[in-house]
Amino acid sequence: MSHKVAIVTDSTADIPEELIRKYGIHVVPLRVLFGEETYADGVELTPEEFYTKLGKAATLPTTSQPSPTEFMNVYQSLLDEDPERAIVSIHLSSGMSGTYQSALLGKSLLEREGDITVLDSKSASYGYGLLVVQAAELALQGKSAADIASAVEGMHRTRKLFFLVDTLEYLQKGGRIGKAAAIFGTLLNIKPILSIDKEGIIYAVEKVRGQKKAMARIIELFQQDFAGKRVNVAIGHTADPGSAIACAEQLRGHFTLNEVVYTNIGAVIGSHVGPGVIAIFMWPVPE
């Protein structure tokens, strides 16, 4: 049975496979390139395989977005199955990638214009993956594309996220920070707490010395918005579930957790932040 609204996203949403299957989410993969070898993110290369290859690679991998034709083919296939269906397509921040623009171009290539809403998440990883899952839940409830888009925007405003990177090497090589800052930060064991601003750009919230202090500061930052509230939390990790479970236990000491989701940070995002990353996404439970 087809749904009135189909939900499309891309692989950088880092949505756990069981949720993709549960909600029938359609995922268009980005690609990861190790030299001459090209892999479809999450299809031909799992996060575990990626981080193993990353540790052995002589040079950093690069990434590429899906072509407009790939998006057009997905949209066309969904409309061929059910011409009456609407599509909501949610993608990686346009401030980090051309994926959103590629999806828009894919829509414009259709011979017959369908009811397709393409949204710029202005976020990355499960920072918007959780919005995609929420959209899929609403689609199953029979909500319209307009209602789903409105709900996604509302949820975007209420959820908060922070990343903690283990090494500054990948941010430096990717042009996010200068080489001198990376070397200096590494020597002093500086752990930048990162987030994503309203324009969908990664920025450093604060720089803290040491992992333990950085995590304590992240908890303080979340408490500014969520103290005393029931919250859902998702924890992204780089193929290191033990670190994510330990993080959740730490959060339980400070927040009333409702739902906890663990998710792998996939190959595309991992190419830019490196291994040893913890990403925490928190949003309030609707009252």
Image: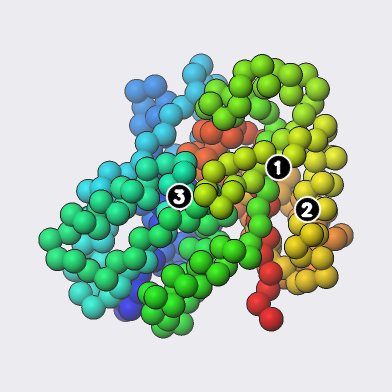
Residue pictured at 40% horizontal, 29% vertical: 33
Residue pictured at 85% horizontal, 60% vertical: 254
Residue 243: percent from the left, percent from the top?
Answer: 73, 45
Query: Mark 2 or mark 1: which comes first in sequence?
Result: 1
Q: Which residue is mark 2?
A: 221
Category of crowding for the residue at label 3, using alpha-carbon neighbours closer than 10 angstroms: few (below 14), some (14–19), many (at least 20): many
Discs 3/1, front: 1
Q: Is residue 231 above or below residue 221?
A: below
Q: Which residue is mark 3?
A: 92
Residue 161: percent from the left, percent from the top?
Answer: 65, 53
Q: Amino acid at mark 3?
A: Leu
Q: Are marks 2 and 1 in contact (CB under 8 Å)?
A: yes
Spatial CA span between label 2 and label 1: 10 Å
Q: Amino acid at mark 2?
A: Leu
Snapshot quadrant of residue 286: bottom right
Q: Is residue 204 above or below residue 168?
A: below
Q: Amino acid at mark 1?
A: Val
Snapshot quadrant of residue 126: bottom right
Q: Is residue 36 above or below residue 206?
A: above
Q: Is residue 218 above or below residue 45?
A: below
Q: Which residue is mark 1?
A: 205
Residue pictured at 62% horizontal, 40% vertical: 203
Left or right for 166, reference 253: left
Residue pictured at 42% horizontal, 81% vertical: 143
